[in-house]
């Protein structure tokens, strides 16, 4: 597993935009920038657990885009996760890929 993904896991879920811990947001941003693409399924599974309560100044979208690079992440795994807007987006994206052969 990539070191940057281990760092993200250690940081825990994305903080809310209401946080006053700017250093935490910066650590998140820095670690996200270090993740090599594509990620594999096990890395994507870790990333799927890191969504917070909002989009954290767009960082949640960065997570979505990283997870989408894991072509071996199963749709079944996504359906087992508790729903939130980001997981829902990933499910729709994976369903569309299956429909349209991508």
Image (cartoon, rainbow, N blue to C red):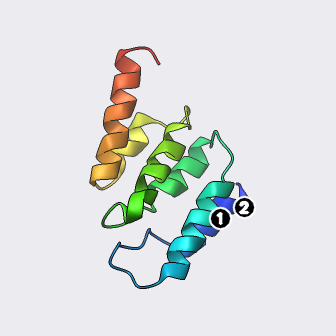
> Of helix, strand and loop, which one carries label 1?
helix
The reply to whether residue 21 is in sight is: yes
In the current view of this chain or complex, which residue is farthest to the bottom? 20
Q: Is residue 9 visible?
A: no
Check the picture and name the quadrant holding the N terminus.
Answer: bottom right
5, above or below 15, in the image: above
Q: Residue furthest top?
A: 101
Q: Are marks 1 and 2 in contact (CB under 8 Å)?
A: yes
Label 2 sits on a secondary structure element that is helix
**Residue 48 locus on image (x, y percent):** 45, 54
* Few, some or many residues within 10 Å of mark 2 (<14, 14–19, 20+): few
Whether residue 82 is situated above or below residue 18 in the rendered picture: above
Judge by depth and name the residue closer to the eye, 53 or 40: 53
Instruction: Give above or below for 102 relative to 18.
Output: above
How far across and down, in percent of the image, does residue 78 sit? 38, 44
**Residue 71 locus on image (x, y percent):** 55, 32
Is 23 or 39 nearer to us in this picture?
23
Q: In the drawing, does residue 18 fall left or right of residue 13?
A: left
What residue is disc 1 on?
6
Residue 3, numbered circle: 2
Q: Which residue is drawn at the image coordinates 53% and 57% (left, top)?
A: 46
Q: Label 1: few (<14), some or many (≥20) within 10 Å? A: some
Occupied quadrant, residue 23: bottom right
Q: CA distance from mark 1 to mark 2?
A: 5 Å
Picture coordinates of residue 72 (x, y %)? 56, 33
- Give left or right: position of 84 versus 2: left
């Amino acid at each position: 597993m990539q070191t940057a993904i281990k760092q993200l896991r250690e940081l825990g879920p994305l903080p809310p935009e209401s946080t006053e811990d700017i250093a935490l947001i910066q650590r998140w941003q820095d670690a996200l920038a270090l993740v090599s693409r594509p990620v594999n399924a096990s890395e994507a599974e870790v990333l799927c657990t890191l969504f917070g309560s909002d989009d954290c100044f767009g960082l949640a979208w960065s997570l979505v885009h990283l997870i989408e690079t894991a072509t071996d992440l199963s749709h079944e795994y996504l359906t087992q996760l508790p729903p939130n807007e980001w997981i829902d987006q990933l499910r729709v994206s994976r369903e569309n890929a299956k429909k349209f052969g991508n």
